[in-house]
Image: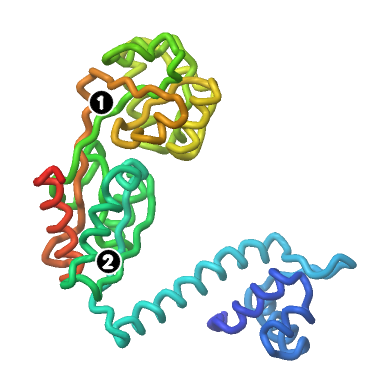
Amino acid sequence: MRDIDLKTLRLFVAVCDHQNMARAAASEHIEPSAISKRITQLESDLGTRLLARSRRGVQPTPAGVTLLEHARNVLFTMERIATDVAAFGSGVKGHVRLVATASVIAESLLDDIALFMREEAHRNIQVDIEERFSRDLVRQLREGSASVGVCWDNIDLEGLHHRPYRRDRLALAVRSDHPLAQKKSLRFEQMLDFEHVGLPPSTAVHTMLQRAAARAGRLVSYRVIVSNFDAAFRAVAANLGVSVIPMEVGGTVAANLGIQMVPLSDAWAHRNFVVCFQSFQGLQPAAQHMVEHLVARAALGA
């Protein structure tokens, strides 16, 4: 098979987006016949039909849908490569790709990084922050697609180095009129009689709660599964259940929604987070400075 060139991929994506060969050609400043010729050659190289024409326009075939997904990823990656390299010519002296879990991002990480970037010595450092589940975060660090990660330490970090970051404490979010709202603290077992608002099964918190319930010989009854803490708070406020959320995430959001945060007394509810990476010496200077900054901020308790 011949190499697939980026221009052909870009034209293929344009045709799929516009669902019309002529409109795609106009947007790309090329003749429709030229696009048709390139896509025909691409279909020949791949040995399968990629587009289907009908009265409604042009639609990707099942094979075309698969190619479209890959093409978008390839084009995005190539654009990032060009942007990242060009940035050094415009004054950016470092680039850090950081991945972190939702809890860390929702708590203190963004404030810590903002302080880092405001320092004069770091003004030419660019930082990309992406939210990931713990297991995906660790995989990206091992594969080298991210340089620094921040996550809960209760995960397999084999092959990675790590340094201590911050701590948090899990709590039960309940409406102010809920029977548990006036408790000073709770054991996890005490909340298993109530329906829960949970996070996706792939999250570390979901897995931890399932294990804790199993140790108690019980099950967590989930009425709603949501994708993030903000949605969990709103579901609790709508009286759809109770939810386990870090105390540090609650703050004014919980108060404004009439939600009480009751700390959990179980030992596992106190969580330690770490900054992790493959090798400190292998990090770019910009990433090394960021790691040192995050660890120092946590040590100060700031």
Q: Which residue sits at x=47%, y=29%?
A: 257
Determine whether, in the image, residue 13 is placed left or right of residue 213: right
- Please provide percent x and percent y for residue 116: 21, 61
Q: Which residue sits at x=35%, y=44%?
A: 106
Quadrant in the picture for residue 274: top left
Q: Which residue sits at x=73%, y=63%?
A: 61
**The N terminus appears in which quarter of the rendering?**
bottom right
- Please provide percent x and percent y for residue 188: 32, 16
Q: Which residue sits at x=60%, y=77%?
A: 9
Q: What residue did someone put label 2 on? A: 96
Q: Label 2, label 1: how many angstroms apart (C-alpha)? A: 31 Å
Check the image and report above or below for 227 versus 72.
Answer: above
Quadrant in the picture for residue 151: top left
Categorize mark 2 by other alpha carbons within 10 Å: few (<14), some (14-19), many (20+). Answer: many
Q: Which mark is residue 269?
A: 1
250 or 132: which is nearer to us?
250
Label 1 sits on a secondary structure element that is helix
Categorize mark 1 by other alpha carbons within 10 Å: few (<14), some (14-19), many (20+). Answer: many
55 or 174: which is nearer to us?
174
298 or 16: which is nearer to us?
298
Quadrant in the picture for residue 246: top left
37 or 223: which is nearer to us?
223
Please report contact status of discs 2 and 1: CB closer than 8 Å, yes or no. no
Q: Which amino acid does label 2 sit on?
A: Val
Q: What residue type is labelled 1?
A: Ala
Label 2 sits on a secondary structure element that is strand
